[in-house]
């Protein structure tokens, strides 16, 4: 399998760390992502391995356009955030939520706003509609 490389900032989680509290976090450091059996494997590399190609860096607007919502959550916005065009089955919704949270959780270097948007959309879509 081929690795995809990305620069990523990580928070150390230490109380009183000036770097994490004042800036985005420590880094950027090189991380590799490999898709194996429907799962994403992540590995810390530190330095980019020789001959490796890295993923295209996108601007802030491109990265966060999917996750933005203002005010109250709505049905179309929740579907967009979760990556669906129509309301999915409950099992598909739960599966997608787990995938997104495991990929964007702040404890593994994800963004807090993105994770909050995913959780808000999931909470909105799991409500009984009837």
Image: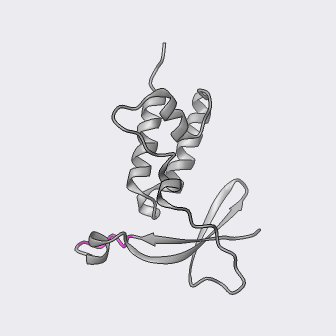
Residue lying farthest to the left in this orientation: 16
**Viewport quadrant of the N terminus:** bottom right
Q: Which residues are magenta?
A: 11-15
In-image side of 105 versus 71 (left or right):
right
Check if residue 122 falls in the magenta segment: no
- Residue located farthest toward the top when viewing the structure as drawn: 130
Image quadrant assignment for residue 33: bottom right
In the rendered view, tell whether residue 120 sits above or below residue 125. below
Name the colouring of the figure.
one colour
Q: Is residue 14 magenta?
A: yes
Total numbered badges shown on the rendered structure:
0
| Residue 96 image-quadrant placement | top right
State left or right for residue 50 relative to residue 115.
right
Q: Position of residue 91 (x, y in %)?
A: 60, 33
Q: Residue at x 47, y 59 (%)?
A: 60
Residue 46: percent from the left, percent from the top?
54, 82
Tell me what residue is drawn at x 61 percent, y 82 percent: 48
Secondary structure mainly formed by the magenta segment: loop
Name the side, left or right, on which 20 lies relative to 39: left
Residue drawn where x is 42% and y is 33% of the image: 123
Determine the image quadrant of residue 50.
bottom right
Tell me which residue sits at (45%, 56%) in the image: 105
Task: Decide which of 59, 94 is in the foreground and name it.
Answer: 59
Residue 23, how many percent across, how many down? 32, 71
Q: Position of residue 97 (x, y in %)?
A: 53, 42
Q: Residue furthest right?
A: 1
């Amino acid at each position: 399998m081929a690795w995809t490389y990305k620069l990523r900032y990580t928070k150390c989680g230490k109380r009183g760390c000036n770097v994490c509290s004042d800036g985005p976090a420590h880094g950027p450091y090189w991380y590799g992502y490999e898709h194996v059996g429907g799962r994403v494997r992540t590995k810390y590399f530190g330095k980019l391995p020789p001959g490796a190609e890295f993923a295209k860096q996108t601007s802030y607007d491109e990265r966060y356009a999917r996750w933005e919502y203002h005010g109250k959550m709505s049905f179309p916005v929740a579907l967009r955030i979760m990556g669906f065009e129509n309301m999915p089955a409950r099992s598909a919704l739960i599966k997608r939520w787990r995938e997104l949270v495991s990929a964007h959780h702040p404890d593994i270097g994800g963004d807090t706003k993105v994770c909050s948007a995913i959780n808000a959309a999931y909470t909105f879509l799991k409500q009984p509609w009837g």
